[in-house]
Amino acid sequence: MGNYSKILLKSTSGSGLAANNLADRQKTKAKLKIMSNILEQAQVAADRQNWPLLVECLQQVTANSSQPPEQHILDQAVSLAIAALEWGDFQDRWEIAKVFPNLGNSAIAPLIAVLEDEDADTEPRWFAARILGKYARPSYPEGNRPEVIQALVKLVKNSDEELSQIAAQTLGNFGPLAIESLATLLLQEDSRQFATAALAQIRHADIIAPLLSVVGDSKVGVRLAAIDALSSFCDSRIPPALIEALKDPATAVRKEAVRALGARAYLDGEFDLVNLLKPLLWDIRLEVCQSAAIALGRLKTDAAAYSLVELLRSSTTPIELQIETVRALSWMETATALAYLQQTLIAEFYNTNLLICQEIVTVLGRWSKPELKATIAEIMIDFLASNHPGVESVNIKQAVALGLGQLGDIRALDVLIKLLADSDNSVRLHSLSALKQLGGEGRQKLESLVKQDNLEQGLKEEIAIALQEW
């Protein structure tokens, strides 16, 4: 290439670069002008206290921008956003709260000023606390802002319960970053309740030690929040606290401790959970008794089953608790639990207690262990053929039919066919549904029976109807 050509090319390249730079400057200038116009509209809206329009303008300033606005624009936008936060109604504040995170760190100091303004109304301060929470999370682009946590910690100590609560909740959302500050707040009685609740949200192993320090607090809410949070962790320091909480005077705390221990069946060998939980079956509060029955059912041991059947057979046990106990025994799905339920079903005392009979029949039909299904089907077939008063109950016959269908035992065919002739239409429908679950053998049996001349006319008609509906 000649020298002239090189010079020409260089000149052309330089001209192109200059043209591009000029175009970029023009775009930037045009963008600034647009931003200025929007901010002017926002200022007019603020002067007229038209907060919805102000919010709309600020949304335009911060939306879909590949580059953040210049600092003087951000500062003006923050000032206007603070005005909307201070003077708008609840809906205006709700909407402007969505804009603040896009305004960057410039908004932090003004928001803290709103937060700390004791002469301001509660609502703008509440919103300021909520908004500031976004600046202290690890996911925030510019990282953690310790001054935000400090301001919120200070607010937790506020005499206004609503502000203390939102500050603690917001701190709880920060995760491990706030554990140390919240643990410090546990030392003060007036902030302990909110700090405990906030720590409970974090679900990090570092909260175990501070929460263990308040499981014996004088306030029920503190103890309950601590026990509830601790029950989520597998740590050797926690079971003794749960065991101690079984004797708590507050119903809610005892109930939570029972639930937590019931979910730790692996501790039975070490702590003898059956004997720890058994007294709670006779608690003065029914809801605690029910929780204890559920917890023992989860242990799935013969000792736990024996404790439950003792409760079930007691004449002083309320019907609601008896039903819960039947369900707990059923969840075990062990041979021992099945034997206890069978004994209860046919026991002399329960002949008139049809609700218990119905519940036993219902839960037995749901068992899933293959090795016990045949035994259960036999129990239900024998029960239906017995002179038990429950056999006359429409609800119990429905439950038996449903259960036999779910168990899928072909030996139930004759019993289910007999139920097709029952005087109650719902029993007949349940029986037909169960027969369908038994599959082709059930249909073949019906087709064979309907051809027999010596079959009872009423049953023959019901079988014909069943085949037609099949």
Image (cartoon, grey):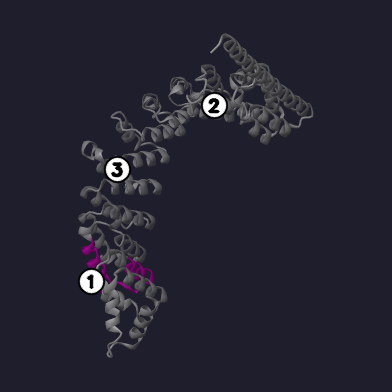
Q: CA distance from mark 3 to mark 1?
A: 40 Å
Q: Residue furthest top?
A: 3
Amino acid type at circle 1 is: Arg
Horizontal and vertical percent for residue 135?
A: 54, 23
Which residue occupies 45% across, 34% down? 220
Quickly name the residue at label 3.
277
Q: Predominant secondary structure in magenta? A: helix
Can I make out residue 128 in this image?
Answer: no
Read off the residue under disc 1: 411
Q: Is residue 378 magenta?
A: yes
> Picture coordinates of residue 416 (x, y %)?
30, 74
- Which residues are drawn in magenta? 373-402
Q: Nearer the viewer, mark 2 or mark 3?
A: 2
Task: Select label 2 or label 1 by which is in front.
Answer: 2
- Which quadrant of the structure image shows residue 239? top left
Cα gap from disc 2 to disc 3, whole angstroms = 44 Å
SS for callout 2: helix
Is the residue under label 3 in contact with that under label 2 (CB below 8 Å)? no
| Residue corresponding to mark 2 | 134
Q: Residue furthest front?
A: 2
